[in-house]
Image: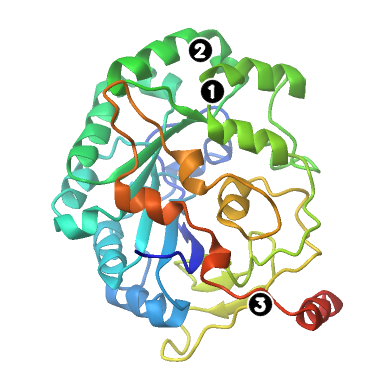
Amino acid sequence: MDKIKRYVECYIPITTCNIQCHYCYIARQEKWKNEIVPIGHSPEEIRRALSKKRLGGTCLLNMCAGGETLLCPDLPKIVEALLAEGHYVMLVTNGTIDKTFDRLVSLPKELLRHLIFKFSYHYLEQHRLKLTDRFFANIQKMRKAGCSFTLEITPNDELVPHIPAIKEEVRQYLGALCHITIVRDDITAGIPILTELSDGEFYETWGVFDSPLFDFKKTIFGKHQDGFCYAGDWSVYVNLGTGTMTQCYEGRELDNIYSNPDKPLHFEAVGNRCRTAHCYNGHAFLALGDIPELDTPTYARLRNRRDEQGETWLTEDVETFLSGKLKDSNKEYSAFKKWYINRKK
């Protein structure tokens, strides 16, 4: 049974997108029109840079672009290389790039069982562009191929009148409700919820989906984490274009994965002095266990669903892997090392 050694958040340097959601900063800044450029590193180079040997074992690699991830022309070969290395790979996508799904579905079956799709359900844009059938067809295509998936919607005020229709549609296509995340205002201090509703009204409105993901995010959103955080060691943030590896979104730079690829990477935890207002993506970092003393649901619990036929969204292999915690494969620091890390900061 594979155990998760590290969680690696991988940024794909593409802002281009084929849809323009009104709440997306990419669309609001007109970046969705930008030219698509290759990552600039071969699949073999990326595999070597993120080898199991360098990372210490089997890792969960989450791959997400600024725009639509599957528009990256190098992606299928990169995914194949990282799966062949033995990692589990998650792809964040709007689910409408048919040609990329056609390329991915042709990968060997033994690799596809460790591939996970995080499908973003952009209801208004899908209906405007008449993409709904294609979207759900691609979900079913990858599911039948043996991949795992999860489906989430980014709640926003314009969607509120459509909640009954959304619930009916997703039940019709998948036999289960989608998950709900929390949309954030990145340009305002404190990173609040992006809504005109009060927090209470927002949570009550979107709570009708009974989403464990949403329920957990409610408990951590807006709350600064003061516990000793192992982000920077047990998890890292990597820009696959530049190779820069940082502790977290706002953590300091630790290394460059493409420099001296035969040498070990440098890891060092954030500690007790996180600079981010709150862990807005703690549904991954905290659920996987970056702050081990926090009692959190497993990441599998937050991502899985069971449909009307009794089938789950996550395969058995993936559910088992995502049910693990990072502390199962990593040693916590001594009291002196924790003191030293905090003193350095």
Q: x, y (%) of residue 48? A: 35, 80
Name the N-terminal-most of marks 3 and 2.
2
Q: Nearer the viewer, residue 197 or 286?
A: 286
Q: Which mark is residue 268?
A: 3
Name above or below for residue 309 compared with residue 311. above
Q: x, y (%) of residue 123? A: 43, 21
Location of residue 207 by image quarter:
top right
Q: Are marks 3 and 1 in contact (CB under 8 Å)?
A: no
Q: Nearer the viewer, residue 229 or 23?
A: 229
Please name which of the two marks, 3 or 1, marks the residue nearer to the observer.
1
CA gap, disc 3 and disc 1: 37 Å
User: What residue is drawn where x is 50% and y is 88%?
Assistant: 264
Categorize mark 3 by other alpha carbons within 10 Å: few (<14), some (14-19), many (20+).
some
Name the N-terminal-most of marks 3 and 1.
1
Element under label 1? loop
For badge 3, the amino acid type reads Glu
Q: Nearer the viewer, residue 151 or 215?
A: 215
Q: x, y (%) of residue 224? A: 79, 49
| Pointer 1 residue | 210
For badge 1, the amino acid type reads Asp
Describe residue 193's horizontal placement relative to residue 157 as left or right.
right
Residue 183 visible at all: no
Describe residue 38's horizontal placement relative to residue 164 as left or right.
left
Name above or below for residue 30 compared with residue 175. below
User: What residue is drawn where x is 36% and y is 19%?
Assistant: 170
Q: Are marks 1 and 2 in contact (CB under 8 Å)?
A: no
CA gap, disc 3 and disc 2: 43 Å
Describe residue 82's horizontal placement relative to residue 249 as left or right.
left
Q: Which mark is residue 163?
A: 2
Name the N-terminal-most of marks 1 and 2.
2
Which quadrant of the figure contains the C terminus? bottom right
Please name which of the two marks, 1 or 2, marks the residue nearer to the observer.
1
